[in-house]
Every structure is written in structure tokens, then in C-alpha cells.
Amino acid sequence: MAGLQWPAMLYRRFGNTSVETSVLGIGGTVFGKLYGQFDEKEATCALKYALERGINSIDTAYWYGQGASECFIGNALKGVPRERYFIATKVARYEKEATRMFDFSAEKVTKSAQESLERLQLDYVDLLQVHDVEFAPSIDVVIESTLPALQRLKERGLCRYIGITGYPLSTLRAIVDKSPVKIDSVLSYCRLTLQDSSLTNEFSYYKARGVALINASPVGMGLLTEGGKGIPQWHPASPETKKAAIDASKYCSEHGVDITRLALNYSASFKEVATTLVGMTTKAMVDSNIEASCLPLTKKEAEVRDYIKRAFFDPLKSKHWEGVELEKYRRKVQAVQDKSHPNQTLV
């Protein structure tokens, strides 16, 4: 459209580094088809278009489709100047089978990081993260084995920065407290949303330590979508939380407001967060997400946002699902162990 002006991308300092990342980043989960199929040709165009629009932050992991997300991104970025993007991947979470899902050993994460670079077709990644640290046998394993291995990879030039990711905020903080290896970033997901904003309680702690905060899943892994249509069957939230999200979405629809836009705008508005990751597979998604992230809400949208927080989410007895997925994982591992070694129990 003639005369159309797109909102300019906003940038924030990545912790204590000299890097500035876009407030909106590309989340690679969708490229692993964890949320369904997508058109790869269209998504490739969308990724390149996102870079043209000023997005420079990209996040992926082997876990996202068992390498599929990394392969897709590696192919999509062919020919794109390396300085155009800040890319992160992860180690320690791998296969779908419970007994092969996690491995935090130094040997495995070292091999995994090198294989990720091959799939991404890169000589180095900007950020290498330990994936879902709460699933480690103990945080001591992460501190004494995993993170030192990442430090050695950093010294070899295979990554520029080191990070950790996870859901329980107390576990993330405990590792940052105790790690002799410098942790440059913490990625938290579903903890800075309209439904659960508990990450705000951690802002001063990480700022004082120069640790960059990355926020993922501003829509709560599908909770904050129209009519709850984006909520996957495997979502760990309680029935009460899911109902609240669906009711909030219905209220938004009745007032002509998009709850997903409200959710993204809310998450991206906090200056304490370096970048907020969102899956995008079309140019239209890129445009709408940039607009939601970089432009203020209308008066009506702000009023609706405040109302649904007050009426639907604030009354929730529990706003998170800490421990649900971990317990489910432990039960699966225990079941396999019981069959193989009847006299052993999982500690």
C-alpha cells in the first residue's frame, strides 16, 4: 500500500555484552513441527523477511524435531551475512524416548554442540545453552560437568556466550548462584505472560549480575490464543488455568480484540528482557508480531488486557505448572527401569 510505514524494530542490550538483540526474536520450535506442519518454502521466505524487517535474534535446539529445526534454519540462512543475526541453540535434551531424552554429560554435550553446528552450517553459534536444566539428575551435574564443557567449547571459538534454560525460576537462579562458569543468559518460558508474570520478580537479581533474560512462549505455549484453539493436547497447565485462558479469549473476541496480540505486546514491553521469542512461518505473522511488539496498544486494547488479567488470571490459585512435566518424565523413566532392573528405584 502506497505510503505505508512499518514500525521500526526496537533493540535491547544483551546482558553485559556489547550485543544488541531485537526485542522480538524467532523461536525455532515451530520449525521442528512440534505445533504442526508448515510450508517450508513460505517459512524460508518469512525468516529472511524477518531479518529484513530488523529481527536479528534466532533460537533453536536439536530437541525441536530432533534436528529438524536446526537443519531448516541452516538451509534458510544460506547466503545471509553472518553478522545479520544472533543465533542460539541448545544441548542436553535429545530424543523422544524418556530414557534417551536427556544427557548432561560433558562428552555428550560437546558432541551435540558440534553436530548442531553442522546442521546449522555454521562455524560457531552466538549462544550455546543448556536445555531444561531442571531435568538434570541434580544441578551439581550441570554446574560441575555440563557448563565446564560449554566453557571449553567457548574457548575453542564454537560459541560466544553461554546460557541456561528452564521452567522453574528457583532452579535457574540456583545454578547462576553456584556456577563458577560465567552464565551470560537465562531463557525462561511461559513465566512472563498475561497468565503468569512471575519472571518480573527475578528482574533485579539478573540485572545485578549482568545476565541477559530471554523470554519464550509469550502466549503460554498456546494458552493465550483465540478460543484456546492453539492449546496442544500435551499442555501441562491445570484444567482451571486452561478454562481461564479460554474464557479470557472469549471475552477478547466479544470486544473485538486479539488476545494473542495482547499477550505478545505485554511480554515484549518489559525492558528488562533482551528478546522475546515467537514462532513465525509466514510474512503475515512477521508483520503482525512486529507490530504487536513495537507499537503501543490502543486504549481499548489496554483496557481489555487489564480486565482479563484482573478477572480471569489474577484469581487463579496456581499460575504455573512447575513439577508436572518433571514428574511425568520421572515416572516414564522409572517404568522402563522397573522392567529392566526390578530391584532398582529412580532417585
Image: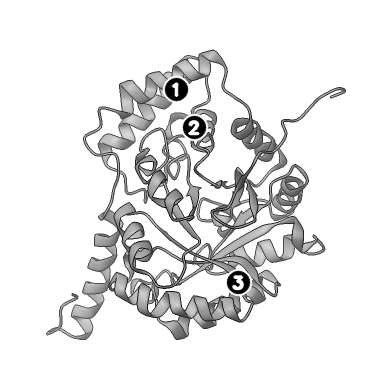
Q: Image height check: is 296 above or below 199? A: above
Which residue has dot 3 on it? Answer: 159
* Sequence-first disc among 2 and 3: 3
Q: Work out whether residue 176 or residue 23 is closer to the camera in this orientation and state it.
A: 176
Dot 3 lies on which element?
A: strand
Residue 305 marker: 1
The kind of residue on which mark 2 rests is: Tyr
Count residues near mark 3 (Cα–Cα under 10 Å), then give few for <14, some for 14-19, many for 20+. many
Which residue has dot 2 on it? Answer: 266
- Residue at the (56%, 79%) spot, across then down: 153
* Sequence-first disc among 2 and 1: 2
Q: Nearer the viewer, mark 2 or mark 3?
A: 3
Q: Position of residue 18 (x, y in %)?
A: 64, 56
Q: Position of residue 63 (x, y in %)?
A: 49, 66
From the viewer's perspective, is 46 left or right of 258?
right
Dot 2 lies on which element?
A: helix
Q: Image height check: is 153 above or below 282? A: below
Q: CA distance from mark 3 to mark 1?
A: 39 Å
Q: Is residue 256 visible?
A: no
- Residue at the (79%, 27%) spot, across then down: 5
Name of the residue lying farthest toward the left = 343
Residue 307 appears in which quarter of the rendering?
A: top left
Q: Position of residue 93 (x, y in %)?
A: 44, 69
Residue 29 appears in which quarter of the rendering?
A: bottom right
Q: Position of residue 161 (x, y in %)?
A: 56, 66
The kind of residue on which mark 1 rests is: Arg
The kind of residue on which mark 3 rests is: Cys
* Sequence-first disc among 3 and 1: 3
